[in-house]
Image (tube, coloured by chain):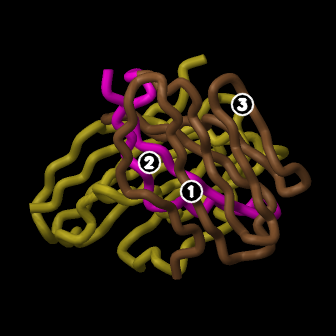
């Protein structure tokens, strides 16, 4: 059972543009929603995270938007740069349990 | 801060052989997780430890897989009688128990190829 569905599978954005990646979850018990960034040959690294008591969280060029009623959350990367080219994973967990990851979005930012 | 260290980085083995991977977490972290990642997919949870106790195992974890963390520091993941379907990146991550899955730090993984 895939508990966290991520889309799109791949994304191409021009430098300076906005990258948007979406995730939907099924388990209403989830209470922690992070995004991870992974470069080739490296493990994932935590980028930004949100809890369901807020609808938006912003850190620099990265913003999470959260819609509890729709059971969806998204990552927005403003002013996308070639250095942002990586694979992005959404994830979810509850009660300090292990994270369940989405299938990933490969982002390419063209110069 | 040396980060999470995994050894080896790459392992090629023949079907039916046993393999063992090692993970050294960040020194003050008492939680240690093992994940598996196949090409084009997200990390898939296998098991985790808090100190030396193995607290959770995925139902997907075959009996051929066993993990240990004998002194609550480093951990080993052993796969017995490897199959081609075991080919994947095996990722280790660590965190503080007080933070659970929050602020998980991943190693660079061990890439296993079963021929």
Say left or right for B84 vs B47. left
The local crowd at label 1, few if under 14, some if 14 to 19, many if 20 or more residues have their Cα within 10 Å, is some
Q: Which chain is yellow?
A: B
Magenta span includes A100: yes
Residue B30 visible to the viewer: no
Would you place residue B61 above or below residue B91 in this image? Answer: below
Q: Which residue is mark 2?
A: B91
Q: Which mark is residue B28?
A: 3
Q: Earlier in the sequence, mark 2 or mark 3?
A: 3
- Residue B59 or residue B81, whichever sits in front: B59
Q: Position of residue A28 (x, y in %)?
A: 78, 75
Q: Position of residue B23 (x, y in %)?
A: 47, 41
Please state which of the two labelled residues, at mark 3 or mark 1, is closer to the viewer: 1
Q: Look at the image and give the residue range highlighted in magenta.
A: A82-111
Say left or right for A80 vs A107. right
- Residue B99 or residue A60, whichever sits in front: A60
C-alpha span from label 2 to label 3: 19 Å
Please state which of the two labelled residues, at mark 2 or mark 1, is closer to the viewer: 1
Question: Are discs 2 and 1 less than 8 Å apart at CB?
Answer: no
Q: Which mark is residue A22?
A: 1
Residue A94 visible to the viewer: yes
Please report, as a chain letter, where disc 2 is located. B
Quarter-wise, where is residue A20 in the image? Answer: top right
């Amino acid at each position: 059972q895939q508990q966290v569905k991520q889309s799109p599978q791949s994304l191409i954005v021009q430098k300076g543009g906005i990258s948007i990646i979406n995730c939907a979850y099924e388990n209403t018990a989830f209470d922690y929603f992070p995004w991870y960034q992974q470069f080739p040959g490296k493990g994932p690294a935590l980028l930004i995270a949100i809890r369901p008591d807020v609808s938006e969280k912003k850190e620099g060029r990265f913003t999470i938007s959260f819609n509890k009623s729709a059971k969806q959350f998204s990552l927005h990367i403003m002013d996308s740069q070639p250095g942002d080219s990586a694979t992005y994973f959404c994830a979810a967990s509850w009660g300090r349990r292990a994270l369940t990851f989405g299938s990933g979005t490969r982002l390419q930012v063209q110069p | 801060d040396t980060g999470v260290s995994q050894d080896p980085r790459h392992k090629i083995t023949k079907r039916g052989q046993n393999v063992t991977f090692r993970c050294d977490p960040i020194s003050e972290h008492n939680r240690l997780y093992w994940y598996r990642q196949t090409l084009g997919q997200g990390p898939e949870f296998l098991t985790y430890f808090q100190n030396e106790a193995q607290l959770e195992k995925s139902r997907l974890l075959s009996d051929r897989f066993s993990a240990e963390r004998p002194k609550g520091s480093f951990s080993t993941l052993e796969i017995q009688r490897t199959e081609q379907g075991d080919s994947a990146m095996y990722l280790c991550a660590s965190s503080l128990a007080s933070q659970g899955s929050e602020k998980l730090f991943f190693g660079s993984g061990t890439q296993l190829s079963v021929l």
